[in-house]
Amino acid sequence: MKSSIWKDPLIKDKKDSRLLIPRPYPRDGWTLNFGQPLTWVFLVAIVGVVIFCIVFS
């Protein structure tokens, strides 16, 4: 994996179609691929659900 696509803990790789990308060190887990527009939709949906639960609980 190219290290130039990694910006701190985030990844932005438009060529890779995956939403979740394994980090360079397997013990560190996975991260979102912010190069894909669907990732932003997924992130906004999660934040929306959390806000909805807080407001209506």
Image: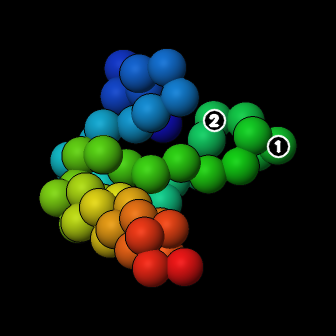
Q: Nearer the viewer, residue 44 or 28?
A: 44
- Label 1, secondary structure: give it: helix
Where 30 sits versus 6, above or below?
A: below
- Label 2, secondary structure: give it: loop
Please state, as top left, top right, bottom left or bottom right, where the C terminus lies in the image. Answer: bottom right
Going by the numbered disc 2, the residue's amino acid type is Pro
Image coords of residue 35 (percent x, y): 24, 46
Label 1: which residue? 27
Who's the residue at 61% across and 41% down the image? 23
Label 2: which residue? 24
Who's the residue at 34% across and 68% down the image? 48
Q: Nearer the viewer, residue 46 or 18?
A: 46
Q: Nearer the viewer, residue 2 or 19?
A: 19
Image coords of residue 15 (percent x, y): 22, 50
Who's the residue at 43% across and 70% down the image? 55
Label 2, residues with CA under 10 Å away: few <14, some 14-19, many ≥20: few
Q: Residue furthest bottom?
A: 56
Image coords of residue 18 (percent x, y): 38, 64
Q: CA distance from mark 1 to mark 2?
A: 9 Å
